[in-house]
Image (cartoon, rainbow, N blue to C red):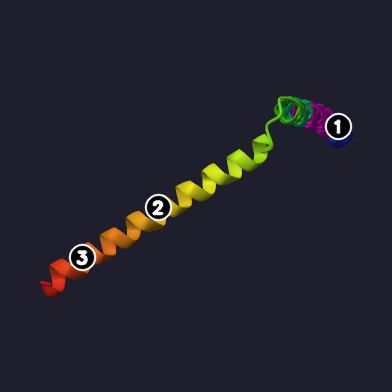
């Protein structure tokens, strides 16, 4: 009787481990496919960006697209800093009554 229950337990544990490995394998495959899809999308986006840069350079434009993007970001940061400065000056004026 004891021997039969030990065999049943061992079979159940083996089946559980087999199912667990199958689930882990399926999860790993889904992660791999998601990462592959993300790399493909990033590569395509970089390819389109490179194509735009080459097109702009062939059009006679001296500034590549990345420089326009950096300039836009720098301008946005400058505007943000100026806005903060105006707010700080306004608070100082209200607090001290200048």
Q: How far is the residue under mark 2 from the one under mark 3?
A: 17 Å
* 46 falls in the magenta region: no
Q: How far is the residue under mark 3 from the one under mark 1?
A: 71 Å
Residue 64 — which label? none
Tag 3, which secondary structure? helix
Above-or-below relation of 9 to 82? above
Question: Residue at (86%, 34%) from the top-left corner?
Answer: 10
Q: List the residue tagged with mark 3.
A: 91
Magenta segment: 8-32
Residue 80 — which label? 2
Tag 1, which secondary structure? helix
In the image: residue 76, left or right of residue 24:
left
Q: Quadrant of residue 57?
A: top right
* 19 falls in the magenta region: yes
The residue nearer to you, when weighing 6 against 32, is 32
Above-or-below relation of 83 to 23? below
Residue 14 — which label? 1
In the image: residue 95, left or right of residue 49:
left
């Amino acid at each position: 009787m004891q021997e039969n229950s030990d065999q049943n337990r061992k079979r159940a544990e083996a089946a559980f481990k087999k199912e667990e490995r199958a689930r882990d394998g399926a999860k790993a495959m889904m992660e791999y496919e998601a990462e592959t899809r993300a790399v493909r999308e990033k590569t395509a986006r970089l390819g389109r960006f490179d194509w735009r840069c080459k097109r702009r350079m062939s059009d006679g434009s001296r500034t590549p697209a990345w420089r326009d993007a950096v300039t836009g970001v720098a301008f946005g940061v400058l505007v943000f800093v100026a806005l903060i400065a105006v707010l700080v000056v306004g608070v100082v004026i209200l607090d001290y009554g200048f």
